[in-house]
Image (cartoon, helix red, strand yellow):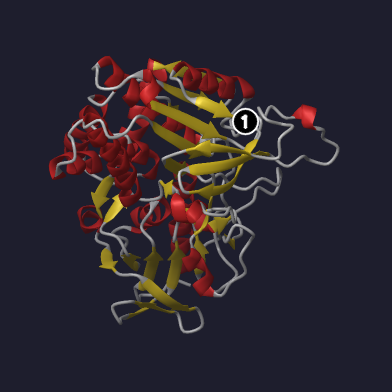
Amino acid sequence: MHTNKRQRVLILGAGFGGLAAARRLRRNPDVTVTLIDRGPAHTFYSMLYEVATGFMHGRDILGEAALARGVSISYERILSRWGCGYVRATVTAVDLGKKIVRTDDGDAHAYDYLIVSFGFAPDFFGIAGLQERAFTLSSLADALAVRSRIMGYLDRKKRGQEVSLRIMIGGGGATGVETAAELANFFHGRQKAGELHSGDWSIRLVEASPRLLSMLPPDASAAALKRLEQLGVKVMLDTCIKRVEDHHVILTPRPLRPGESLDALVCEFRAEAERAFEAEVVIWCGGIRGSASTAMLGLALDRKGRIPVDPTMAAAAPDVFVVGDCAALVDPESGKPVPNLAQSAAEMGALAGENILRRVHAQPPQSFVFHTYATVIPLGGKNALAHFGTWYLSGLPGYVVRQAASFRYWLTILPFAIVLRDFVRSTFSYMSND
């Protein structure tokens, strides 16, 4: 039933899902909206590979700032336009009974409706040494750390202190493929400039399934594989990381499925239990799970640490909605979960915001619409693979589609003039690295 009292909506986490919910609720006279996030800026995670592989400005602060500008936008710049409150703090406790959220600054935040958008964390699958020794691409800081490590190698190379840099990338999904392609493209550029030779670097991409980008059709996967091989990336399929040691990665053929024989594997060392490969840099892109923060709600979690929700995005608690990578939403017809994509997180967030307004006005809720999302995979330089249902574009046309999609997303959260200025600046920064 509608009430004259403005309902307090609290959003925990301002990623794609959290911001989409705030955007749907912005300046609505029936609600007040406050977002809590531990960071100062919204990060466009799918572009972090550009920061990790951006080397054109050296190691000066201006260079890092230019790279970061294209993947992060201050929350205050976004939310002040929407009439939403913003608290920079870490959530320490959630009391669903009393409807109170506590943060590390000592404050207690009461709510009438809660939207949980804690996001994701890397899933290391219990692989020995992986979490301690591998880089990830889960934040801007992670991407800058990868960049710093490789910049350090280049500096030492110029002084003749190192012979080669061996990079191992775990995971043949979108992030792993993008990172491998961009790094290889960069190293080729340094070769053309006379700074490196072909034997000075190597990149191995390890994937546990028999093909890359398993969420795409086989012909799209084959196109990505061909591009990586042209760039000099060594792709190892049906291969798992068993453990990570100092300067070494131990690989093993993936476990056989019931009824399979070794002949079914495309792994290059099927008859061997394991093989060691030297690697100075290990980058893990092999999977994600729900943020550890989801556990503090005390709700049941699935095996990936996510909170199950119904098609309206409601959780098994009064007036609680969960969106994005920490939500487990399954298509009742196909039995498949909603993919971990920015597009799906944004749709979840917008739906949660809509259904809160519908509850306030005593209207029936809407349900999530399951459909296939367009996918664009950058493949180094001005080259990308854009997949739309049953067909795809590759090369420069795919790259243009990628830039258009990024530009469109920024327009949903910032005015056109600001997006045009910042997007063009960052795009030219990234392009100058190609």
Q: Is residue 241 left or right of residue 198?
A: right
* Amino acid type assigned to the residue bearing label 1 in the image: Leu
Q: How far across and how far down the image is residue 433, in percent?
A: 26, 26
Residue 434 figure quarter = top left
Which of the pair 235/37 is nearer the observer? 235
Q: Please tell me which residue is depicted at 36% across the width and 37% down the height of the picture.
A: 49
Residue 94 higher or lower than 399, as above or below: below
Q: Position of residue 381 (x, y in %)?
A: 34, 22
Whether residue 412 is visible here, answered yes or no, is no
Work out which residue is located at the far bottom of the displayed protein and give it.
Answer: 98
In the figure, residue 29 lies in which quadrant? bottom left
Image quadrant of residue 108?
A: bottom left
Tell which of 97 and 172 is nearer to you. 172
x and y, in percent, of residue 18 in the image = 39, 57
Q: Nearer the viewer, residue 123 or 147?
A: 147
Tell me which residue sits at (30%, 81%) in the image.
107
Q: Secondary structure at mark 1?
A: loop
Q: Which residue is mark 1?
A: 237
